Image (cartoon, rainbow, N blue to C red):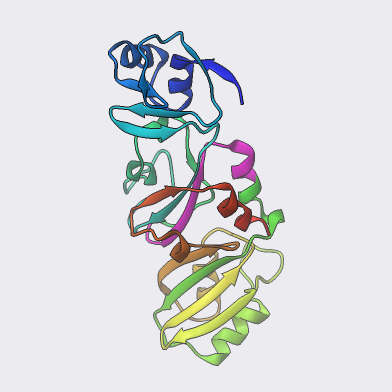
Amino acid sequence: MSKLSLDRILQSQGFGTRKYCRALIEDGDVAVNGAVVDNYKATFDTGNLVLTVFDEDWRYREHVYLALYKPADYECSRKPSHHPGVLTLLPEQFEWRDVQPVGRLDHDTTGLLLMSDDGPFIHAQSSPKRHVPKVYQATTAEPVTQALVDELLAGVQLHDEPAPLKALSCVQRGEHQLEIVLEQGKYHQVKRMLAAAGNHCSALHRSQIGGLTLESLGLEEGEWCFLEPEQLALLVP
């Protein structure tokens, strides 16, 4: 907990430049814990602080940790090239806060995506050394066979990997459906493993990271939510 001037608080929360934040305050558009404050030099303890900006409440957060239900045809990049970026699905203030995706999902892959402005958190969650299991539902072009399941569990060799990569778990869920659990997080890993095993991935969805499931968050496609400490604890392997 720290004590900061109101303009610094607003800027830290992604509401714009210091100059813009001062104008918001002086125009009476900002309330702190329910009371309008028009003096940008006023200082407040940030612990349990709730800001109201343009009649919308925002709890002060030193860092933000978000979960997004990523739809298809969005890129996990701050500088997308062929499709809209996932940041366009979030309020503008998160771009000011330099929120970034934790790892990446292909533009055509849907499901659970973590996002944050906490650099060490992003690095830790993206590191292959963490061995955080991730659960995917893959739709295959060709019918699933037991031989395919066995090969994915035993490990398949990708051309740029020194050793075969294998699934932690692989269960057939339908004629063209597989549930695959991985912990490595290599580039296009599910798609490349299926191709190496003689099939093809026609659709891919990530439903779980660690112990955090998309279902438990209750999000619809394109929706996001803050992650609280008890949810972040589920990401620890």
Q: Quadrant of the C terminus?
A: bottom right
Residue 10 location in percent, x, y? 43, 22
Residue, x 39% and y 50% (percent of image)? 224
Q: Quadrant of residue 90?
A: top left
Residue, x 43% and y 68% (percent of image)? 204
Q: Is residue 83 magenta?
A: no
Residue, x 43% and y 67% (percent of image)? 205
Residue 75 appears in the figure: no
Side of 117 relative to 154 (left or right) = left
Residue 112 appears in the figure: yes
Q: Quadrant of residue 92?
A: top left
Side of 141 relative to 183 (left or right) = left
Side of 159 relative to 34 (left or right) = right
Picture layout, residue 111 above or below residue 232: below
Residue, x 46% and y 84% (percent of image)? 173
Segment colored magenta? 107-123
Q: Is residue 112 magenta?
A: yes
Q: Quadrant of residue 200?
A: bottom left
Picture layout, residue 150 above or below residue 128: below
Q: How many marks?
A: 0
Residue 234 location in percent, x, y? 61, 58
